[in-house]
Image (cartoon, rainbow, N blue to C red):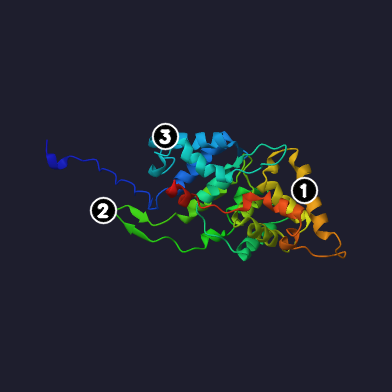
Amino acid sequence: MDEDSLTYALVPKPPPLEPREQLPPFFLNTVQLAKMVAWLQSAAPGGQVLLEVLVAVFHRAAALAGLKLLPAEWIPLPPSKLRALLVSYQTGDRPGFVPCVDWRRVMYSLANLPEPTVGQLQKLVAAVKSLGPQIESLEAVPRAMVKGLEMWFGLVAAPESSTDENGQTVLKGHQLPLLKEAVLDIFTNSSGNVNLLHLILYACGSTQVLGIEKALQVLGDGNVSKDALLPILSLVSLSCFSSGGSGADIELVDMAIAAALEGKEAGTVLSVAALMEHEKGLALVSSCPGLEAKSPHTMLSKL
């Protein structure tokens, strides 16, 4: 047989390697963010979870090194150190309520998004409202519609990139399109709707006082009112997860506003500072630790 006449099968060219995100210690890449969100949704679909359950979930995720659900720096962390991190997210410590953690807030802070301005969040709210009358609430926006909205963290410059010796693209940061998907995953329910209200409120995180002031500006005119305070208090106290929580919220807000307006003329406009001049107003603001921004990666590096 003439060897020159033989036909040799061509070996297909291997597909290009997926870009690799080069991140600081303890930072989750976009794939890990998406995987952890899926894990947490299976454990607590609504978001609310007991502290010890959440500690166990993160400890288990770190122990399964082969799945790479968490960065390598998380692997040696014992439950005590994970608890020291996660307990700072615990809220809802009011009479008649069991303190819990909203894992969505934990994952939002682990995504390490840039802090949005009031204007950027107001623009997002306006964009949602312009989608049409079928959008009845910021708490349930179809995922397909949200995907087309411009998010503040998508406006930053793309991360620097290089190519390693294997021809793989290395990014010094997150891949922005995948980051958006991972963040939307955090706030998407089983019906495929995104709770943009809760995403926006957690994005307002700062100190408790500044967080509330920012939320009031984004969702209203910046002034204190019952309608403006109730959705904020409902989330940050985690009463939104309890069927009986709204009554306690209404009572707390009514008492705080009534105390602040006592002796004032009709139509007086209240600021957060004016609300806090009274004991009941101060108690209301103190019950809103969920709007306090966290720096989990800094905390982890010090454990």
Q: Can you say which quadrant of the picture contains the C terminus?
A: top left
Could you say whether the residue bearing mark 3 is in a helix, strand or loop? helix
User: Residue tagged by mark 3?
Assistant: 63
Could you say whether the residue bearing mark 2 is in a helix, strand or loop? loop
Does residue 137 show up? Answer: no
Q: Is residue 8 left or right of residue 132?
A: left
Q: Is residue 160 left or right of residue 141?
A: left
User: Residue tagged by mark 1?
Assistant: 252
Picture coordinates of residue 165, whole percent (x, y): 26, 53
User: Residue tagged by mark 2?
Assistant: 165
**Residue at (72%, 37%) from the top-left corner?**
96
Whether residues under marks 2 and 3 lie with C-beta atoms below 8 angstroms apart, the answer is no
Task: Say which quarter of the image contains residue 3.
Answer: top left
Q: Name which residue type carries label 3.
A: Ala
Q: Nearer the viewer, mark 1 or mark 2?
A: 1
Q: CA distance from mark 3 to mark 1?
A: 43 Å
Does residue 73 show up? Answer: yes
Q: Name which residue type carries label 1.
A: Leu
**Residue at (39%, 44%) from the top-left corner?**
73
Task: Say which quarter of the image contains residue 100.
Answer: top right
Q: CA distance from mark 2 to mark 3?
A: 30 Å
Mark positioned earlier in the residue sequence (3 or 1): 3
Mark positioned earlier in the residue sequence (1 or 2): 2
Picture coordinates of residue 229, whole percent (x, y): 74, 54
